[in-house]
């Protein structure tokens, strides 16, 4: 009985392996703008909110998001997110700096700002996607972009939405005053 089960298990594993190899070796289908991110408002309405989505693996072989796609997703974010160049760090100061998602949050003091930065760090670790974060007295500035593609990916918008959700639970956060 055991040899029959092992034989069937080996056969099933060989089938799975050959199917996987066919998928891997298949020529990649070119991505079109309409299928890459969001093609229409009807699709936006049916997709789950960004803050409920998970980051997906992002490799250097993926194209960065176009400016039009970024602007469309930017409009779906709450808060005062904007597109601005990635921050120049010591390691990347000689590189080209395409756009990143950027937002500054105000806090009542340094301690609450630092606590929020630590919460962003925990979120980043959980999702496997890490921002640039600058902490100052009473202020935290966050930049999200995808390092692997040196540009924007849907993951950046997912993380911006999750950051926005996180800040409203943060102690000491000072929301922006509504414009009169």
Image (cartoon, rainbow, N blue to C red):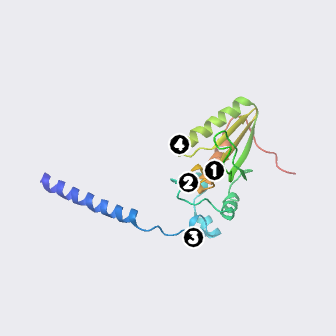
- For the point 53% across and 42% down, the residue is 126
Q: Where is 122 relative to 147, above or below?
A: above
Left or right: 155 in relation to 76: left
Count the numbered circles shown. 4
Camera-side mark, 2 or 1: 1
Dot 1 corresponds to which residue?
145
Camera-side mark, 4 or 3: 3
**Which x, y percent locates residue 34?**
59, 70
Camera-side mark, 4 or 2: 4
Calculate the distance from the C-alpha at mark 1 to the C-alpha at mark 3: 22 Å
**Helix, strand or loop for disc 1:** loop
Disc sitting over residue 126 in the figure: 4
Mark 1 / mark 4, whichever is N-terminal: 4
**Which x, y percent locates residue 41?**
65, 68
Dot 3 corresponds to which residue?
32
The residue positioned farthest toward the top in the image shown: 111
**Which x, y percent locates residue 153?**
60, 56
- Few, some or many residues within 10 Å of mark 1 (<14, 14–19, 20+): many
The answer to whether residue 10 shows anywhere in this view is: yes
- For the point 57% across and 65% down, the residue is 36
Q: Which of 30 and 113 is in front in this view?
A: 30
Calculate the distance from the C-alpha at mark 2 to the C-alpha at mark 1: 17 Å
Camera-side mark, 2 or 3: 3
Left or right: 11 in relation to 50: left
Q: Where is 110 relative to 76, above or below?
A: above
Q: Do the residues labelled 1 and 3 touch (CB within 8 Å)?
A: no
């Amino acid at each position: 009985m055991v040899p029959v089960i092992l034989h069937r298990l080996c056969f099933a594993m060989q089938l799975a392996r050959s199917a996987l190899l066919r998928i891997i070796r298949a020529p990649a289908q070119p991505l079109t703008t309409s299928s890459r991110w969001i093609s229409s408002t009807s699709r936006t309405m049916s997709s789950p909110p960004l803050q409920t989505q998970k980051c997906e693996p992002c490799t250097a072989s993926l194209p960065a998001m176009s400016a039009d796609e970024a602007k469309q997703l930017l409009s779906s974010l709450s808060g005062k997110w904007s597109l601005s160049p990635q921050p120049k760090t010591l390691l990347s100061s000689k590189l080209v700096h395409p756009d990143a998602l950027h937002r500054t949050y105000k806090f009542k003091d340094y301690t609450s700002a630092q606590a929020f930065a630590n919460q962003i760090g925990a979120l980043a670790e959980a999702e496997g996607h890490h921002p640039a974060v600058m902490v100052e007295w009473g202020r935290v500035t966050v930049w999200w972009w995808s390092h692997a593609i040196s540009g924007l990916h849907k993951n950046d918008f997912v993380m911006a939405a999750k950051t926005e959700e996180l800040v409203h639970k943060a102690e000491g956060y000072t929301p922006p005053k509504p414009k009169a």
